[in-house]
């Protein structure tokens, strides 16, 4: 009997896909949460749409986006709210760090960063499945949400959306890794999620920020999570400009992953596995 | 070449000390006192392929720390460690592919998933080939009697059931070394025997090297050919169980059930315990032959029953701990 299993590093990706899909399936089970989430986000969206309609009726100054564009932008934000790491770190990892079960994560023949990153991608996508689609249908049919004007626009949107998911998951993974220091992870979680909340464009589209803030917004990675993909969707940014924005998205992604990797390596070195 | 080489391993932890009370908490913000705890204070040993080793010591002696260093989880301060030719914390990923670990107080199964899905997931994580996986899985299911548990979510299992599943989970990738950290903790006697039996078979039939830490000395007596005792971060004793016994004491016990309740006096034996008709005597077999002692006592007293046993291992261990305090 061969005692040692065959391990080839070329298949390493299999491990990550396995953990992603397990986490994805687990998250899909929370159907009650999905329906409740959809309900909340739908009504919240209605309120935001009404606020902007009132604003457009009363304003005479030229605005950076048309009223129709803003309405679609808002509905997109409601549909893809789960891209914002608003619940902080992965609750499973938090429980593992608290109980000490995290030691088992370290005896897996995988890179711990990407092991957790796979989970983070699942966490940023699975809850969206039952929210995004109904939101498109409801808002598209009844509340003036537009579809992308043409196919190149839709393609540019999809590409930037894909990287938005990866960037957001990398931020989520930073929160996961911070648990190795703080155990509960609430401090950093709150800070990072509020930053994302404000600077991704979910509260008000980033173009409505004052001019002096634009330079800062442009150098932060957060706008690549919602604002830039949404403006591609609207055709507000022409699709060929994907070649300008994509390198930025990739650079941010690499920077976030590299930073996370480094911090995790430090975290493991100082690890004190608690409880005997 | 030995499977496991450990030389002079040292691991210390810094622990922040908190002052009691509100004033202490405020002071703690500005200035913290750190206390250094030496969990491993220069331990060395080598382990050959196929050994089944008992690793025992009181709480806080450094057992779990050793297991965590050996399994690549913790990085030691100084010292050398090579397992199957690899340094665990430097080549963690290739190292852990060849070892299995069970921490008795934790589970590696996915809490919300049925047991079988955890096994499938581990197959993918360890990249075990499907054919080999099916074979290992079916063997484990048969030996550990898991058939009826496979579809139950892990959170609904009893501790004994969960431990059997955890053992199977640690072996899905057929490791050649298995670390078991208190695998029988909290188990009832039936589960304990099942776990013990399984460990023994694994070691004998598949030649898996097993390092077992436990507080249950019956585990050690039933399983281990070699026992390492650790206390305050140092190896106090290392060798076969008999050597450990011989090193601490050669004493044996004679337990006699008398017809009456009279006292037993004998120049070569002393009474350590008396419980109704039952008398526990200790004696040194080097000073008096067991047969002679029994003959003398049965000649002097009407005896219902008697038997000889070795000093309980608990007592040996506690003496060893006391010596090194």
Image (cartoon, rainbow, N blue to C red):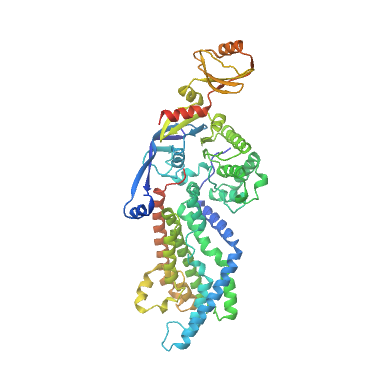
Is B225 situated above or below B39?
above
Identify the residue at the far bottom of this view.
A60
- The residue closer to the viewer here, A3 or B322, is B322
Write down the quadrant of residue A201 in the picture.
bottom left
Horizontal side of residue A219 vs A15, given as left or right: left
Q: Position of residue B87 (x, y in %)?
A: 42, 41
- The residue closer to the viewer here, B49 or B244, is B244
Q: Position of residue A183 (x, y in %)?
A: 44, 54
- The residue closer to the viewer here, B157 or A217, is B157
Is B307 situated above or below B230?
above
Write down the quadrant of residue A258 in the picture.
bottom left
Q: Can you see residue B112?
A: yes
Horizontal side of residue B70 vs B140, given as left or right: left
Name the image quarter holding the N terminus of chain A: top right
Q: Position of residue A44 (x, y in %)?
A: 53, 75
Q: Can you see residue B1?
A: no
How many labels sit on residues?
Answer: 0
Identify the residue at the far left of this view.
B31
Q: Position of residue B93 (x, y in %)?
A: 46, 47
Is B286 situated above or below B177?
above
Say which residue appears at 50% left-offset and 27% top-offset: B315
Identify the residue at the far right of this view.
B148
Write down the quadrant of residue A245 in the picture.
bottom left
């Amino acid at each position: 009997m061969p005692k040692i299993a065959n391990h080839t590093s070329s298949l390493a990706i299999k491990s990550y896909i396995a953990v992603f899909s397990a986490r994805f399936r687990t998250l899909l089970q929370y159907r009650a949460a999905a329906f409740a989430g959809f309900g909340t986000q739908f009504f919240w969206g209605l309120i935001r749409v009404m606020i902007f309609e009132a604003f457009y009726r009363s304003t005479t100054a030229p605005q950076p986006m048309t009223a129709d564009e803003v309405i679609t932008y808002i509905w997109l934000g409601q549909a893809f709210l789960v891209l914002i790491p608003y619940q902080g770190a992965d609750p499973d990892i938090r429980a593992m760090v608290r109980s000490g079960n995290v030691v088992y994560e370290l005896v897996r023949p995988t890179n711990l960063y990407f092991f957790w990153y796979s989970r983070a991608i699942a966490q940023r996508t699975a809850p969206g499945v039952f929210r995004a689609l109904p939101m498109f249908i409801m808002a598209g049919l009844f509340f003036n949400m537009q579809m992308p004007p043409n196919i190149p626009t839709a393609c540019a949107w999809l590409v930037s959306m894909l990287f938005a998911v990866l960037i957001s998951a990398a931020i989520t993974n930073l929160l996961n890794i911070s648990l190795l220091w703080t155990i509960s992870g609430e401090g950093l979680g709150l800070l990072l999620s509020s930053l994302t909340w404000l600077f991704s464009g979910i509260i008000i589209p980033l173009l409505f920020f004052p001019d002096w803030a634009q330079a800062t917004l442009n150098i932060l990675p957060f706008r690549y999570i919602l604002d830039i993909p949404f403006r591609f969707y609207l055709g507000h940014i022409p699709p060929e400009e994907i070649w300008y924005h994509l390198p930025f998205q990739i650079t941010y992604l690499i920077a976030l992953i590299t930073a996370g990797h480094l911090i995790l390596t430090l975290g493991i070195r100082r690890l004190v596995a608690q409880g005997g | 070449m030995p499977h496991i080489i450990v030389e002079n391993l040292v691991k210390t932890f810094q622990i922040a000390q908190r002052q009691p009370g509100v004033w202490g908490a405020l002071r703690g913000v500005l200035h913290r006192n750190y206390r250094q705890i030496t969990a491993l204070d220069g331990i060395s040993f080598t382990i050959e392929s196929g050994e089944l080793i008992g690793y025992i010591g009181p709480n806080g002696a450094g057992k779990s720390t050793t297991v965590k260093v050996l399994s690549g989880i913790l990085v030691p301060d100084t010292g050398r460690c090579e397992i199957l030719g690899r340094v665990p914390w430097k080549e963690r990923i290739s190292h852990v592919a060849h070892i299995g670990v069970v921490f008795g107080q934790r589970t590696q199964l996915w809490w919300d998933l049925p047991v079988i899905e955890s096994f499938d997931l581990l197959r993918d994580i360890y990249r075990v080939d499907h054919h080999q996986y099916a074979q290992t899985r079916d063997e484990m299911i048969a030996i550990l009697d898991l058939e009826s548990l496979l579809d139950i979510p892990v959170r609904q299992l009893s501790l004994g059931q969960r431990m059997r599943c955890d053992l199977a989970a640690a072996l899905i990738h057929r490791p050649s070394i298995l670390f078991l950290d208190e695998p029988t903790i909290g188990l009832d006697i039936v589960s304990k025997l099942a776990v013990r039996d399984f460990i023994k078979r694994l070691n004998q039939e598949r030649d898996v090297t097993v390092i077992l830490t436990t507080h249950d000395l019956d585990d050690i007596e039933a399983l281990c050919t070699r026992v390492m005792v650790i206390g305050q971060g140092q190896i106090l004793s290392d060798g076969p169980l008999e050597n450990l016994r011989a090193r601490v004491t050669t004493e044996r016990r004679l337990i006699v059930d008398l017809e009456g309740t009279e006292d037993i006096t004998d120049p070569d034996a002393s009474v350590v315990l008396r419980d109704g008709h039952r008398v526990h005597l200790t004696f040194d077999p080097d000073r008096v032959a067991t047969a002679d002692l029994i003959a003398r006592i049965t000649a002097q007293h009407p005896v219902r029953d008697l038997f000889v046993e070795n000093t309980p291992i608990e007592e040996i261990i506690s003496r060893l701990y006391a010596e090194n305090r």
